[in-house]
Every structure is written in C-alpha cells, then in structure tokens.
Image (cartoon, grey):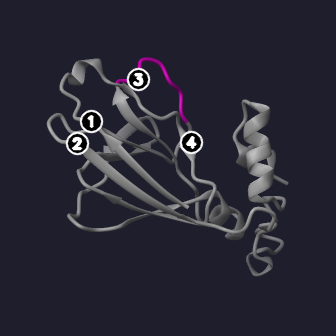
Amino acid sequence: MLGVHCYPPCLNRSNLKSGLPPHVDHSIITVLLQSAPGLQIIDVDSWKNVPELKGSLQVLVGDHLEVISNGLFISFQFCVLLQQFNTCSYSTNQHRTIPSSCDVRLSIANLHSFGMDEIVLPCAKLEDENNPTIYKGSSLRDFLNFLSRGDTRTFMETIKS
C-alpha cells in the first residue's frame, strides 16, 4: 500500500495541532521518504528528533514484524503533529512529525505486508521456554474489524497470548 501525504507550511507554530491521531502501521515494515525534517520519536516522556539524512529512506517497524519476531522488534505508534498537544498520555515507541514553518512537507510511505486473510504468527524458531509466545495469530482483516469496533485498547493488546 502506498500513502502520500502533503502538509502545508505551518506559519504559526504556537497554534499547532495533531494532523493524524496516534497510530501504528499494521504492516511488516513501512518505507518512508520525506521532503523535510520533522520525524520525532518518544523516549519515555520526551520527544526526540530523528536525525535528517537528506534523500534517505526511513524504515519503520510495523505490527506484523513485531508479531513475527515475537516481540524482538517493536512497532512504533506515531502521529503527524500540526498543532501542539495539550494533554495526551502515550506509551513508549511512538513517533510523530512536525511540519516546517515555511515549507510544504511531503511524505511518501510504502507499507509492506501480507494479504487480507493471511494469518501472521510468531516465528516458531524465536520461541522457547525463556521466550514464550507473546501473540496470537491475526490477519489484516482482523485488524480492520478491530478498527470498526472502536475498541479503546490497541490492536496489539487484543492479540497478546
């Protein structure tokens, strides 16, 4: 799946607001190309800038890779920040972007995943008595059904063993 997002310049940074709600990509990986810096990741309670490497692709871990790796790789929750958050509590491993004050920001995300009904399970070779199975199997259809229910938990919380 390919997602293209165009964000207008943010001329008044004191009046910033979230452009997308926090979410995790339900994919194996997302390959991201951005026209301007602004990607941030949360470390406990503070946002940190991801260094800009002009022309580079950024690879984000999605839920499917977290499941396949049995928690070895952790997916990241993120949002696009267009206005400042007032009161939001977040778990760790989130990321967000902050728009430029003078440039249009273009983001192209290529999400790589499995088919709609293919069940994603943890890799058996990564499970043993010291590393028990963390997740139950699920599909993209399961994820979409979860979204339509309006559950307040994250999808990953619903598939923990």
- Callouts 2 and 1 close, C-beta under 8 Å: yes
Amino acid marked by disc 2: Val
Graded by Cα atoms within 10 Å as few (under 14), some (14 to 19) or many (20 or more), the crowding at tag 4 reads some
CA gap, disc 2 and disc 4: 23 Å
Q: Mark 3 sits on what residue? A: 85
Horizontal side of residue 103 vs 77, given as left or right: left
Q: Position of residue 141 (x, y in %)?
A: 78, 54
Amino acid marked by disc 3: Phe
Graded by Cα atoms within 10 Å as few (under 14), some (14 to 19) or many (20 or more), the crowding at tag 2 reads some
**Quadrant occupied by the C terminus:** bottom right
- Callouts 3 and 1 close, C-beta under 8 Å: no
Q: Which residue appears farthest toward the bottom when viewing the image?
A: 125
**Mark number, residue 8:** 1
Q: Which residues lie in the magenta part? A: 84-90
Q: State the residue in front, 130 or 27.
A: 27
Horizontal side of residue 89 vs 146, given as left or right: left
Q: Mark 4 sits on what residue? A: 23
Q: Mark 2 sits on what residue? A: 104
Q: Position of residue 158 (x, y in %)?
A: 80, 45
Q: Is residue 22 above or below residue 40?
A: above
